[in-house]
Image (spheres, rainbow, N blue to C red):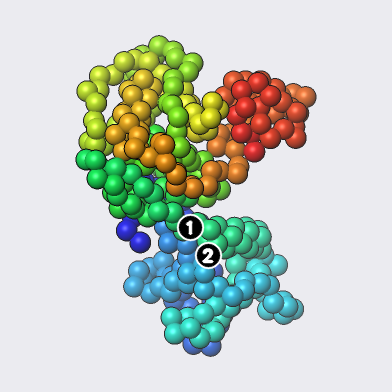
Amino acid sequence: MHQHPMFDDKLVKRFAYDADVIKYVSGQPNEMIDELVIHPIEVGNKLEFKSKKETSISLSIPIQDIISLNLPEQKKGALTREDILLEIEFYDSASNKNSISFNVKDIYVQQILDQVKALQKAEQEYWDAIDLQYYLDGIPKTTKVYYRGPFLSEGEELLWINTKIEGAINKHIMWLEALTNFRALYYDFTKHESGRIPLSFVDDVVVKNKKLTSGSDRVGTFTGSILSISHVSSGTIGDVVFVKDGKPTVTFLQVSDPNDIASLANAVIEELFKPLKQGKKTQLPLIEEPIMKLKTSKTGELVCPYCGTENHAASTFCSNCGFALR
């Protein structure tokens, strides 16, 4: 796959647990390995058994090669009250079945099981791709886009990005908003899900809820050169709304210089996708989950993140503006 991350992979949160390997792939205990690290799908989607001291000692198991991860019958007296035995069965590099048994603290067992289950589910559709058609210098082109994740495909360029970073010392990325020459994207690193729309589907890009700001804290950064515009900080923040069939789809909330972002997106649409507007569009699935965090009122109703209208808890779309709530 020809693709590059839109993010710094060092900022993607890994989950590390102390592990006591009592049966390694050799069938014997391995006292050198003392840690289990779970790498999420954005950075490999794998389990890594490693040594904290000897970096060369490591065994990685891709999530897709895991057959089962379960709790075998616990032997009485073999463990402390805080230890739980887990056993992972998997296919090795030669496609043979193998297994590792290891102890972890009981407070982390369910967390490990849930994380592996979530990453196995994510793996099923995460790398689905579509052939996206566009025009470059008047010449029709086609490229394969892995549309669910924050990765750039061949011919795709990152034009603008906004990220949410948490942590003072151990910083990690929570989500990102991005505009490329192919799509608008909101990506959640916790859920491994995205809200997205191909620019070939977008009818218009508009700005809502503009406000003046001091400009000391920038919300979003222009990064690309394609169809670049003369950018001057406007000291304005606002919502950039990507509209399809008269309804908002992806919205970048309260970002800096929203007019420049909208102008850039519309320029890209005009240049790369206008010849396709009258023809058949690439069928790129839209998100089935909310693309922005939903809030509930004191009465339990869903508050539309786009227009602020309170909707019934079971609503799929906002009764006022039609925004997709689910």
Count neighbours of disc 1 (C-alpha within 10 A) and say few if under 14, some if 14 to 19, many if 20 or more.
few
Q: Nearer the viewer, residue 85 or 216?
A: 216
Question: In this image, 158 relative to 87: left or right?
Answer: left
Is 128 located above or below residue 72 in the figure? Answer: above
Residue drawn 69% across the image and 29% down it? 302
Secondary structure under tag 2 reads strand
Residue that extends furthest to the front in the rendered view of this protein: 278
* Picture coordinates of residue 212, whole percent (x, y): 40, 11
Residue drawn 41% across the image and 66% down it? 52
Find residue 325 and report its image quarter. Answer: top right
Of labels 1 and 2, earlier in sequence is 2
* Picture coordinates of residue 261, whole percent (x, y): 35, 26
Residue that extends furthest to the right in the rendered view of this protein: 299
Q: Which residue is mark 2?
A: 18
Secondary structure under tag 1 reads loop
Find residue 173 and report its image quarter. Answer: top left
Q: Which mark is residue 168?
A: none
CA gap between label 1 and label 2 equals: 34 Å
Residue drawn 38% across the image and 40% down it? 276
Q: Nearer the viewer, residue 97 or 203?
A: 203
* Picture coordinates of residue 123, whole percent (x, y): 52, 61
Q: Amino acid at mark 1?
A: Asp
Question: In this image, 184 relative to 320: left or right?
Answer: left
Q: Amino acid at mark 2?
A: Asp
Question: In this image, 21 relative to 256: left or right?
Answer: right
Q: Quadrant of the N terminus?
A: bottom left
Q: Which residue is mark 1?
A: 128
Is 190 located above or below residue 266 in the figure? Answer: below
Is 123 located above or below residue 217 in the figure? Answer: below
* Picture coordinates of residue 10, whole percent (x, y): 36, 51
Number of residue marks: 2
